[in-house]
Each structure stands twice: as C-alpha cells, then as structure tokens.
C-alpha cells in the first residue's frame, strides 16, 4: 500500500474522487475516466511530469466490505534530463494503480499509527499519493536520451556522440612528470656540453 497517514480532513485537489454515487453495496462499480492537471512534485529531480500538464486516469471504483477499491492506470508525459549528456528527455509513462480506501468505521478498527492506511473521508478519496508513489517507483533513477548515449567528455565537456571516436586529450601521466624533468635537464646539459666543445 501507499505510505500515507490516515487523514480526517476532507481531501481537496484534482485527484479527489466523489464516491457517493457508488454507495456501500459490495460489488457496485463505477468507471472513472478523467483528465486532471499534474501537481508539483510528480516525479524525480531527473524526470518528472510538468506541473499543470494532463494526467489521464482510466480506472474503476469498486465497493467492497472494507471500503472502496480503486484500480486502473494513470498516463502522463514526462520531461527531464539525460543522466549522461544532460540533453532534454521527453517520454510518456503509464502506471498501474490499485489501492483500497477504508470506510471510516473500518479505518477506526485499524491502528491509527499505521501510515499505510488510506481512508474514505466525507465520501471522497484522494488518488494523489497513490499516483505519485506508483509513478515515482516506475521511473528510472538515471534516465537516458537513448540507450547508447556516450555522454560528455570528462576533460572538456563535449558531447562524445558529436565529437567522434577520435576525440581525446593528451594528458601525461603525473607519475612520469619527475622523470620528464630529468630528461629535459639531461637534454639541456648535452646541448651545453656540445656548445662548449665547439668553442674549444
């Protein structure tokens, strides 16, 4: 279930559904097909649903003995950054939803310290935490603009896909720096020695 503390205030927001027409007769069902604007924080820092963009809910509400079972899908467009080259990433995601909202009297029988409990409040259910948790768990931690993205050069920041396979930087191994100094000093000494002999 979704981690969300049992709430007593009437829920508000675009993801709130009114269940009064469903009634409390077990087995009663009602389809839910709505498009709602995405709230803030729907996604991860690297890949997210833009605030205000449409989220399509295609689900059904079913009355059961304990409460109302919501099952279906949520579909939304994603915008983010490639974790390798930082180019913009655009995608679409569809996540499965299934959550039981307990009737108030049933919820009262459950330990109120249990943060996994979702409840029907004033004949309304709030799908926002359900959609958010399902979507975040479905998103990749490191999104890519494409599977074979080569990323950026660690030396100059150039996009390796554009720079080509011959892109490189001459960076001598620092462990050879001291030896290089001796070599240069030796070469300078040889030149000085030759010049002295030529003068003689």
Image (cartoon, helix red, strand yellow):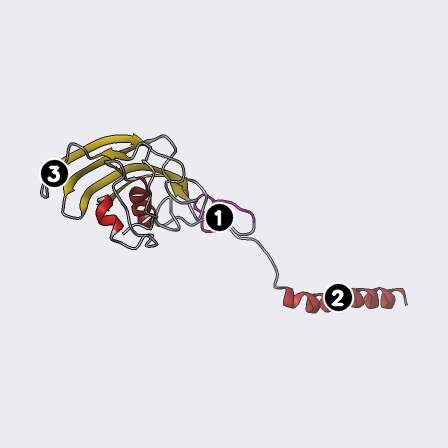
Residue placed under numbered mark 2 in the picture: 187
Instruction: Tell me if I can see residue 96 in this picture.
Output: no
- Looking at the image, which is closer to me, 83 or 134? 134
In the picture, the disc for residue 152 is: 1
Using the numbered discs, state the Cα–Cα distance from disc 3 to disc 2 in whole angstroms. 90 Å
Q: Secondary structure at mark 3?
A: strand
Q: Is residue 162 magenta?
A: yes
The picture places residue 183, in percent across and down from the top left corner, at 72, 68
- Looking at the image, which is closer to me, 4 or 134? 4
Please name the predominant secondary structure of the magenta segment in the image. loop
Mark toward the viewer: 3 or 1: 3
Q: Is residue 190 above or below residue 78?
A: below
Residue placed under numbered mark 3 in the picture: 29
Q: Secondary structure at mark 2?
A: helix
Residue at image location 36% in from the left, 37% down from the top = 49
Question: Which of pointers 2 and 1 lies earlier in the amino acid sequence?
Answer: 1
Q: Is residue 165 magenta?
A: yes
Farthest residue, direction right: 200
Tell me the crowding category of disc 1: few under 14, some 14 to 19, or many 20 or more residues within 10 angstroms, Cα based.
some
């Amino acid at each position: 279930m979704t981690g969300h503390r049992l709430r007593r205030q009437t829920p508000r927001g675009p993801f709130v559904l009114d269940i009064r027409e469903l009634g409390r007769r077990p087995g009663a069902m009602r389809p839910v097909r709505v498009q709602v604007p995405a709230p803030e924080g729907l996604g991860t820092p690297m890949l997210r649903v833009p605030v205000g963009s449409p989220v399509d809910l295609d689900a059904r509400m079913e009355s059961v003995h304990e409460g109302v079972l919501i099952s279906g899908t949520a579909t939304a467009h994603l915008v983010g950054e490639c974790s390798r080259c930082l180019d913009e990433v655009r995608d679409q995601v569809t996540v499965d939803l299934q959550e039981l909202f307990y009737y108030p009297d049933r919820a009262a029988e459950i330990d109120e310290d249990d943060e996994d409990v979702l409840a029907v409040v004033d004949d309304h259910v709030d799908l926002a935490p359900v959609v958010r948790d399902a979507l975040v768990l479905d998103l990749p931690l490191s999104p890519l603009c494409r599977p074979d993205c080569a990323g950026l050069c660690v030396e100059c920041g150039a996009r390796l896909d554009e720079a080509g396979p011959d892109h490189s930087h001459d960076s001598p191994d620092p462990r050879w720096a001291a030896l290089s100094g001796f070599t240069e000093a030796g070469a300078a000494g040889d030149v000085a020695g030759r010049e002295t002999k030529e003068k003689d």
